[in-house]
Amino acid sequence: MESSAPELPLEAVEGFPMMSVVDDSFCVTSPTEITVKKKYCGVFLNQRYKVLDVNGNLLFQVDGSSLEFRKKRIMRDAAGSPILIMREKVNLSLLHA
């Protein structure tokens, strides 16, 4: 019979403390089933991801363009209000190589 190591909290496993970057109302404490739908909008390849619950209710959406230099994404709540802005980190040393 093999013994397994006890599960450590995420902060001990990853080496970083856990922290919330959005309001607690957008976080859940148990596994939740969701559906993510991706849609291309317009000529500039704007992308919209809709995140829905099991009943098809919109939980939040993420908008952005794949042609932008820094690939900015905006996460919005169901009412369309921004809750988080994400930008891709650009390694400038690769541009001067």
Image (cartoon, helix red, strand yellow):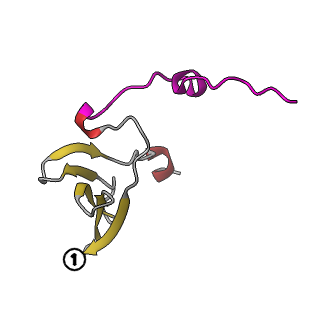
* Label 1: element kind: loop
| Residue 41 located left or right of residue 35 | left
Q: Position of residue 13 (x, y in %)?
A: 60, 26
* Residue 61 placement: quadrant: bottom left
Q: Residue furthest right?
A: 1
Q: Nearer the viewer, residue 17 or 71?
A: 17
Q: Residue furthest bottom?
A: 43
Asked whether residue 12 is drawn in magenta, I would say yes
Q: Nearer the viewer, residue 28 or 78?
A: 28
Count numbered badges in the picture. 1
Q: Position of residue 93 (x, y in %)?
A: 49, 44
Write the start and end of the magenta stretch as one range.
1-24
- Residue ID for mark 1: 42
* Residue 34 placement: quadrant: bottom left
Q: Residue at x 57, y 21 (%)?
A: 12
Query: In the image, is residue 97 above or below residue 15?
Result: below
Q: Residue at x 50, y 50 (%)?
A: 94
**Mark 1 crowd level (few <14, some 14–19, many ≥20, 10 Å Cα):** few
Task: Assign the magenta stretch its main secondary structure.
Answer: loop
Q: Position of residue 84 (x, y in %)?
A: 24, 42
Q: Residue at x 25, y 45 (%)?
A: 85
Q: Nearer the viewer, residue 1 or 85?
A: 1
* Residue 65 placement: quadrant: bottom left
Q: Position of residue 1 (x, y in %)?
A: 88, 30
User: What is the three-letter code of the residue carrying label 1?
Assistant: Gly
Asked whether residue 70 is drawn in magenta, I would say no
| Residue 87 located left or right of residue 94 | left
Query: In the image, is residue 24 above or below residue 41?
Result: above
